[in-house]
Amino acid sequence: MTTTFQVIALSSLDPFADDRHDEPKLLYPDALKYAQELKAQGKAFRVFADGVATEEQRRAFLELGGVE
């Protein structure tokens, strides 16, 4: 099974990204690109993995400032 990711921009209405049922599930390259876009916009974000993310994948999101 392929691991998919949800990259959720944090907001004042949902600061913990609890409401994510309508958010798309992305494969790693697309999720990483979206996280890079959010960082470039100065937005905080969380990443949720559906499956087992590799250490390299986790580290890439953390280095971009993703909140665990």
Image (cartoon, rainbow, N blue to C red):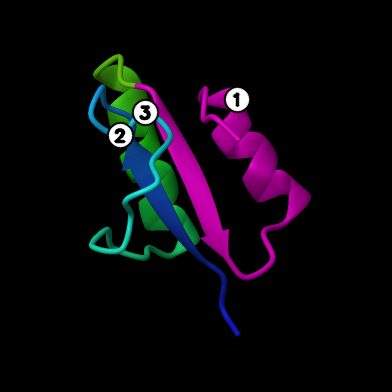
Query: Which residue lies most toward the bottom here?
Result: 1
- Where is residue 43, by image quadrant? top left
Could you tell me which residue is drawn at 54 percent across and 29 percent down?
67
For label 2, the SS is loop
Q: CA distance from mark 3 to mark 1?
A: 20 Å
Query: Which residue lies most toward the right here?
Result: 55
Indicate whether 65 appears above or below 19: above
Indicate whether 23 appears above or below 17: below
Magenta-highlighted residues: 44-68
- Where is residue 62, by image quadrant? top right
Residue receiving disc 2: 14
Q: Residues within 10 Å of mark 3 (few under 14, many from 20)?
A: some
Could you tell me which residue is drawn at 32 percent across and 51 percent down?
19
Q: Position of residue 38 (x, y in %)?
A: 30, 29
- Check if residue 58 falls in the magenta segment: yes
Q: Is residue 63 left or right of residue 44?
A: right
Could you tell me which residue is drawn at 66 percent across and 44 percent down?
58
Q: At label 2, which amino acid type do we have? A: Asp
Could you tell me which residue is drawn at 44 percent across and 45 percent down?
32
Answer with mark 3 or mark 1, whichever residue precedes in sequence.
Answer: 3
For label 1, the SS is helix
**Residue 63 numbered mark, or none:** 1
Kindly indicate whether the residue at mark 2 contacts the one at mark 3 (C-beta within 8 angstroms).
yes
